Amino acid sequence: MSSLENELKKLIIESLDLEDIGVDDIDNHEALFNEGLGLDSIDALELGLAIRKKYNIRIDSEKDDVVNIFASVAALAEFIESEQRAA
Amino acid sequence: MQLDFIITQWAVWPPLPPEQNSPNQWLANVPPMLKRRLTPLAKTVFCAVSQCIDTHRIVPMVFNSSHGELAKSLAMMEMLEAGEEISPTAFSLSVHNAIAGLFSMAWKNKLQCTVLSPGEEGMAPAFIEGLGLLQEGAERVLLVFYDEPLPAFYPSSPYRLSSDTSCALALMIAKSGSGQALTLSSSALTGNDGEQPVQLPAFTRFLTEPQTRLTFCTPRRSWIWEKRFE
């Protein structure tokens, strides 16, 4: 498992108050929203804010493909890595 | 004005006596994804209400709170002042009906739900609203009263509008049935017996003790609850 993916899981758990869930409970390719982990639209905003604060990467709901970026931990890590390479 | 009704069931949190203080059993049925959004005051409300609606889960509800979760709004305003971004979750839960909304989601209660901010009138407006629903034909109505201490930022002490503890009181009311029969009336007598946070402990004592009459004076009128024994 890449360290970024691990780091993102910790970020998700902490920023979204997932009290009963550990890093090992989140699968890299599991859906984060609706079915899967079961996050909702408020979580998407909260996670967007947490990513902006931690990585200084802004997810633009007008330009970026938000549904795919937030699809799973693996997808999110891929997006952050590509943004970091582009910066 | 004389309004008769029955309190068929009631519960207060923290409980009396306080040794029975174990919120977990009352929060066990809340889905974890909702539970993580419950603030301490929301948990207090959930614990009181859960004990009151075990048999009649789906009822119209009236929530009554002087200040709601004002501390949360203050914290967000302080963050904005400091130039920080505020949490979308905290923002979404900062409205006066946030706890009622979480409760209706957790209990899948889609019936009418009213949330009042009664100011100087205290607890009485929730009774007026609830009795109106009974009059319209509801079999029973759940009244939920809750408040927590105001943050020190607000100058509450000279106005009798805050207390130093959090409390939630849930009352199931009906027009008939077994329970404590009460009559609510009002009079022109004015005074200042404090807002809901100050009234709540007095109302709970009224329910538990032999005292037959309770009066709360407000700057506009007084409200009188009287026990009926038929």
Image (tube, helix red, strand yellow):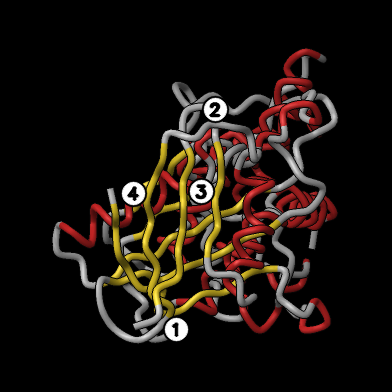
Vertical placement of A61 versus A29: above or below? above
Residue type, mark 4 in image: Ile
Single out the mark in the foreground, 1 or 3.
3
Q: Is residue A39 left or right of residue A81?
A: left
Q: Is residue B127 left or right of residue A54?
A: left
- Label whose residue precedes the other's in the sequence (3 or 4): 3
Q: Is residue B68 left or right of residue B230?
A: right
x and y percentages locating residue B50 in the rendered image: 53, 75
Vertical placement of A16 versus B179: above or below? above
Q: The residue marked by circle 1 belongs to what chain?
A: B
Q: Is residue A29 visible?
A: no
Q: Which residue is mark 2?
A: B219
Q: Separation of disc 2 and disc 3 at Cα? A: 14 Å
Do the numbered discs 2 and 3 sit on residues whose CB atoms are within 8 Å? no
Residue at 60% from the left image edge and 70% from the top image edge = B211
Which element carries disc 1, helix, strand or loop? loop
